[in-house]
Amino acid sequence: KLSVYPQPVTDRITLEGSVLASSEWDVAVLHINGTLVEAFNAKADAGKLTFSTRSWDKSVYIAHVSREGKHFVTKIVKY
């Protein structure tokens, strides 16, 4: 299970959970309409992934976080 905060987000979002550990994760962020906004690799630090949402428009997004067969999906609201 992942915690996502703050919600709604303004400029930085954090995904947190023991499942993330300290390893590289593939992150894909899609607009609610299905359009890919960005895709990148991110290294978790102490079970947390933090990344910028500054360039995103105000809307609802879906983040897909995956690594070696593990896959998590979460909703992000940009305010």
Image (spheres, rainbow, N blue to C red):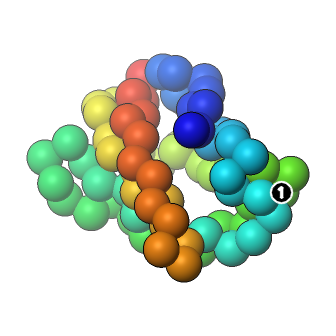
Farthest-out residue, bottom:
68
Farthest-out residue, left:
33
> Is 22 or 36 nearer to us in this picture?
22
Quarter the N terminus occupies: top right
> Is 47 or 34 nearer to us in this picture?
47
Residue identified by numbered label 1 = 45
Residue drawn at 43 percent across, 70 percent down: 39
Quarter the C terminus occupies: top left
Residue drawn at 39 percent across, 28 percent down: 77
Q: Position of residue 43 (x, y in %)?
A: 73, 67
Q: Position of residue 60 (x, y in %)?
A: 30, 33
Q: Position of residue 12 (x, y in %)?
A: 63, 39
Residue 27, compared with residue 59, is above or below; it is: below
Residue drawn at 54 percent across, 78 percent down: 68
Left/right of residue 14 with respect to residue 79 in the rendered view: right
As helix, strand or loop, the secondary structure at mark 1 comes to loop
Left/right of residue 23 with respect to residue 37 in the rendered view: right
Q: Position of residue 72 (x, y in %)?
A: 45, 52
Residue drawn at 42 percent across, 34 percent down: 76
Left/right of residue 9 with respect to residue 44 in the rendered view: left
The three-letter amino acid code for the residue at tag 1 is: Asp
> Is 35 or 23 nearer to us in this picture?
23
